[in-house]
Amino acid sequence: MMFVLGGLAVLLASLSLAISVGAVPVPLGTVWGVFANKLSPGFVEQTWSQGREAIVWEIRFPRALLAMMVGAGLAMVGASLQAVTRNPLADPHLLGISSGGAFGAILALLHTGLFIGLLTVPLLAFLGALGATAIVLGVSRFADATSADRLVLAGVAVSFIIMAGANVLIFLGDPRATHTVVFWMLGGLGLAQWGQLIYPLVILLVCGAWLIAQAGALNAMTIGDESAATLGIPVARFRLVVFVVGALITGVMVAFSGIIGFVGLMVPHVVRMLVGGDYMRVLPSSALVGAIFLLWADIAARTIMAPEDMPIGIVTGLIGGLFFVWLLGRRRG
């Protein structure tokens, strides 16, 4: 409980700082004054300009909230996949789910057009992520790669193939529009809008609640398929459902943030060091730490090359790589 309360306090402080810092610094009092007045007009005397209010409310607030949702979602998916595959290296990126989501998003942006409006990109991103999951499971069955480590290898192979297909789509697409694809290839939160946040929020709440409800089954899966089966868990079907739920979360997050690696791989490791291996604690703690981590990654992305935004995928990749170098050294010691 103390960990959760402390984490929520850090999350609130990180959210405040993420909205405050940037090419145009905004005082924390202004940040929360704007927020208070949006909830209750006239609650705080307005001492700030309309320009700063637009920066806080129209640009930075939705961006910070999207960062929290994406970080929480990817961390929960990573923790769940690591349980059902019994592989600490499993995450949406390595298993090809993120690549499938990016393939669907690129297909919508460069070739099909927004045929059902703003829902087109999230829908095709989810279908791409789900298709990648099906391919990984099919390849693993075809190659008899049913063990956890070989399943990850199948995911890596499928990820490379799908990204090759995505590059073909980029090559065949309109050269004038390909710059928008960089957003999905390198990751970024700059397109966050209030009207679109409802989609990742609903998916995160519904799917995240389902994963937490399955914490007992995930605990059993970490012991082994045989032990889980003796407890009455339909191992193959449960693993498939977790993959589908992971594909749904990842596909929607990729649609709004692009490919952001290492969050689902790194955060569950950190959380297990802090709270242990019980998934009743690991999953909500992963969501909390993932949200905090991506907020700080976004702060770094916006300040390192200010006023330009560095793609957030570069920041998470650098931090994640250094983390695992440290982790290897720690285990060796």
Image (cartoon, rainbow, N blue to C red):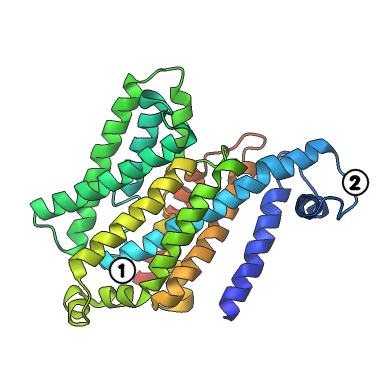
How many labels sit on residues?
Answer: 2
SS type, badge 1:
helix
**Dot 2 corresponds to which residue?**
47
Residue type highlighted by circle 1? Ala
Does 267 sit left or right of 40 as displayed? left
Q: In which quarter of the image is the N terminus?
A: bottom right
Picture disc at residue 83 = 1
- In this rendering, is residue 216 above or below 329? below
**Pointer 1: residues within 10 angstroms few (<14), some, or many (20+)?**
many
Mark nearer the viewer, 1 or 2: 2
Residue 245, percent from left and from top: 34, 57
| Residue 189, numbered circle | none
Discs 1, 2 touching: Cβ within 8 Å: no
Residue 216: x percent and y percent?
Answer: 34, 78
In the picture, residue 162 is in which quadrant? top left
Of residue 163 and residue 199, the one placed in the foreground of this image is 199
Please report the residue visible at 60 percent of the width from the left and 70 percent of the height from the top: 7
Q: Which of 61 and 327 is in front in this view?
A: 61
Q: Which of 117 and 29 is in front in this view?
A: 117
Residue 184 shows in the view:
yes
Up-down relation of residue 274 to residue 131 (above or below): below
- Badge 2 crowding class, 10 Å Cα cut-off, few under 14, some 14 to 19, many 20 or more, is few
